[in-house]
C-alpha cells in the first residue's frame, strides 16, 4: 500500500495491478480539489486487508486483478461498507462483467482509454450520483431496453422453485423448504423446463442467466 498526503478531505483508493497506470492515475487524483489522501494497491487481497483499518470515501477498482477479481472485491466491500463509493476502472467491457459489477454494488464503470472528466466524476459520486464512460452508458441502456428479462409465464411458485434450483437444491430439499410434496415440486420443475424450453439443468442455468436470475 502507498499513501499520499494526509489532511482532511476526500480519501481515495485505487486497486490496479498495472504499476505505471496506477501511479499515473494516482497523480491525477492527487491534483483534484478536495482530495486529501490517495492509497494504491496492486491486488484485491492487499486492499481488503488494509481496508479493515482505513476509511475511504471512494475507491477505483480494476477487474482483471491477480488472485481475487475486482468484481469479487466489489461484493465484499459493498457488503461491509455501505458508505464507500465504488467505481470500476478497467479495460473489460463485456455485458456480463458490467452488469455483475453494477449489481454487486459499483456505482460507476469507467473504461481505460476513454476520456474521463475526473473532477466531474469524483464530484458526481460524492454528491450521491453515478458515473459511466459513454460507451458503457450506451451498453447499459441497451441492456435495460432489451427484451423483458423476467419469465412472466412462470407462476410465483414456479419462480420460487427456479430460484431454489439455481441455489443448487434438489427436488427433495426444495419440497422440505417449501413445505410441499416432492412429487408436486417435480411437476413444477417439469413445467418450468417446458415453459423455458430447456431440456437439462445446464440449459436451465443458461436460461436463468439470460433472464437475470444469475
Image (cartoon, rainbow, N blue to C red):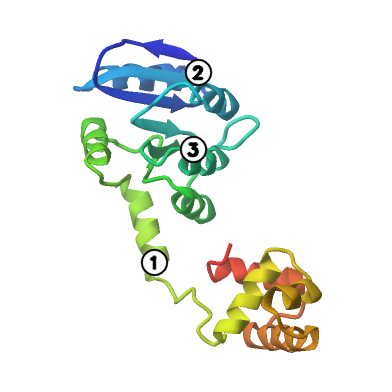
Give residue 109's position: percent from left, percent from top: 39, 44
Label 2 environment density (alpha carbons within 10 Å; few <14, some 14–19, many ≥20)? few
Q: Residue furthest top?
A: 5
CA distance separating discs 3 and 1 = 25 Å
In the picture, residue 125 is in which quadrant?
A: top left
Considering only vertical position in the picture, is 120 above or below 204? above
Q: Earlier in the sequence, mark 2 or mark 1?
A: 2
| Badge 3 element | helix
What residue would you read off at disc 2? 19
| Badge 1 element | helix
Question: Which part of the image, by quadrant, shows the C terminus?
Answer: bottom right
Q: Earlier in the sequence, mark 3 or mark 1?
A: 3
Considering only vertical position in the picture, is 201 above or below 153? above
Task: Residue at 47%, 54% (x, y): give it.
Answer: 103
CA distance separating discs 2 and 3 = 22 Å
What residue would you read off at disc 3? 77
Give residue 194's position: percent from left, percent from top: 68, 88
Q: Which of these two is toward me, 109 or 179? A: 179
| Badge 2 element | helix
Name the disc covering residue 144, or none: 1
Label 1 environment density (alpha carbons within 10 Å; few <14, some 14–19, many ≥20)? few
Label 3 environment density (alpha carbons within 10 Å; few <14, some 14–19, many ≥20)? many
Amino acid at each position: 500500500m502507498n499513501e499520499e498526503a494526509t489532511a482532511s478531505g476526500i480519501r481515495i483508493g485505487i486497486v490496479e495491478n498495472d504499476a505505471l497506470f496506477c501511479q499515473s492515475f494516482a497523480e491525477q487524483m492527487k491534483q483534484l480539489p478536495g482530495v486529501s489522501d490517495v492509497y494504491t494497491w496492486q491486488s484485491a487481497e492487499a486492499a481488503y486487508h488494509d481496508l479493515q483499518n482505513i476509511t475511504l470515501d471512494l475507491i477505483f477498482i480494476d477487474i482483471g486483478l491477480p488472485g481475487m477479481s475486482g468484481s469479487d472485491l466489489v461484493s465484499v466491500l459493498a457488503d461491509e461498507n455501505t458508505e464507500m463509493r465504488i467505481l470500476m476502472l478497467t479495460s473489460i467491457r463485456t455485458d456480463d462483467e458490467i452488469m455483475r459489477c453494477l449489481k454487486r454494488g459499483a456505482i460507476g464503470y469507467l473504461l481505460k482509454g476513454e476520456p474521463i472528466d475526473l473532477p466531474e466524476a469524483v464530484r458526481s459520486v460524492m454528491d450521491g450520483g453515478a458515473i459511466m464512460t459513454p460507451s458503457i452508458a450506451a451498453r447499459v441502456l441497451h441492456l435495460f431496453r432489451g427484451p423483458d428479462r423476467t419469465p412472466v409465464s412462470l407462476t410465483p411458485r414456479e419462480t420460487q422453485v427456479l430460484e431454489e434450483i439455481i441455489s443448487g437444491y434438489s427436488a427433495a430439499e426444495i419440497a422440505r423448504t417449501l413445505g410441499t410434496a416432492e412429487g408436486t415440486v417435480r411437476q413444477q420443475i417439469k413445467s418450468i423446463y417446458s415453459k423455458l424450453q430447456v431440456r437439462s439443468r445446464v440449459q436451465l442455468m443458461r436460461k436463468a442467466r439470460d433472464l437475470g436470475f444469475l
